[in-house]
Amino acid sequence: MGKIKNILLSVDLEGNGIVNYDSSDQKKMYLNTNLQNTMYVYYDNVAYAKKVFTETDGILSYKIKISHDCLMHGMYVEKYISKVPKITVHDALFYSFIASPEAITTGYLNANTAETQKKKGAITLLDAVQTCNAKSYLDQGGRSGSKVSKDDSTDKADNSIFKRESVGDIKYSTKGNIDLMSLQFISCDQTYDRFAFNPDKFNMFKNFLVKRMPTFNSELGYYLIKDTTVKLPEYGILFSNDDVLFMVKDFLKKLLSLYIKRRNGDVRVSSLKIKLVEDVIEDTYEKGKAWITISSMKDIEALNFETDFFYEQFDAVQAEELRKEVDRLKEEVEAKEKAETLAKNERNKIKNAQKKEEKEKKIKENNQ
């Protein structure tokens, strides 16, 4: 087996009922269509399933779906600490969050007045779309509440009647990929606008990550994408092959164990297949290497491959010299632009003064 550039995913799910609801605004899709009588509700007290709509020869049809966000939330809801602004003002909490296989794999964004840290996720997972002929319908439900008045002046209660889309047994499928180029490197550099964390706090980052990923032993350095046309190295961390394997396996375990449960519906993964991509042109969803079926945690633990690394280490001294040269050129350009702006402003000032003088001269001539 050659070096692996990417990992394709093919996932089937099955369950019962609806697990991902949409806004009541979806009702507008059914107006003046063949589905108006069965799916349109005038009032807003209705819960529709998320859907993919198609129209053929004026006939509107749909398939129920589970959104990417719902799938990812179902995989990580028990693993993440709360994603609230408060964790960003506490270094230990924040670095405990970002220094984890989950955050590195799925990405994060923390924007504040001091600095913005962000990491692009390595996972692409499309919405899971219905593959069976299950037919949904609007079911009527009700909620009962306490009496409107606490005295005996009225027997009215705070009850409500609503409509909710329902369905029986249902199957879905989705596909995606794990981008090993994005997964293998974390930038701590402002140059490329990929500042994932403050390099001054690397020791804190490393201490937290080693506890979750014992294979991690990388250090900060300068790295350059192979065959890039921009020969300016980037400061960051390059993970080892063992680290990449650890994070891939961690994600596959969560995907295989995915189980989304609501009060009136649930769904779980029924089939998981992966394809290890050596050639991005030949190894696609439709052709190339055979799919590998993942049916148990043992299959995931047995998974082994060599990652194709897109980054190579760059000499630190040369990197600093290059950066100084870039900074010098940047200062020259900024100084030139500033001088041109000042000269332009001076020309405009002179021109405006001349116009004002001519205008005043004309006014005097007219008054004489």
Image (cartoon, grey):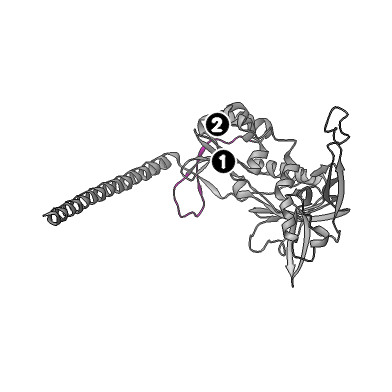
368, above or below 237, in the image: below
When asked about the image quadrant of residue 297, the answer is top right
Query: What residue sits 82% from the left and 61% below the top?
Result: 37
Would you say residue 13 sits in the magenta stretch?
no
Secondary structure at numbered mark 2: helix
Pointer 2: what residue?
A: 202
Q: Which mark is residue 118?
A: 1
Residue type at the position of mark 1? Lys
Q: What stretch is highlighted in magenta?
A: 216-233
SS majority, magenta: loop
Q: Write down the quadrant of residue 244 in the picture.
A: top right
Amino acid beneath label 2? Phe
Q: Picture coordinates of residue 154 (x, y %)?
A: 87, 33
Placement of 98 over or under 92, stated as above or below = below
Quadrant for the N terminus in the image: bottom right
> Which secondary structure lies at badge 1?
strand
Q: Callout 1 environment at 10 Å: few (<14), some (14 to 19), or many (20+)?
A: many
Q: Nearer the viewer, mark 2 or mark 1?
A: 1
Q: Residue 73 at what x, y percent from top left?
A: 72, 42
Local packing at callout 2 (Cα closer than 10 Å; few below 14, some 14-19, many 20+) is some
Q: Which of marks 2 and 1 is nearer the N terminus?
A: 1
Q: Extreme front residue here?
A: 153
| Quadrant of the image occupied by residue 239 | top right
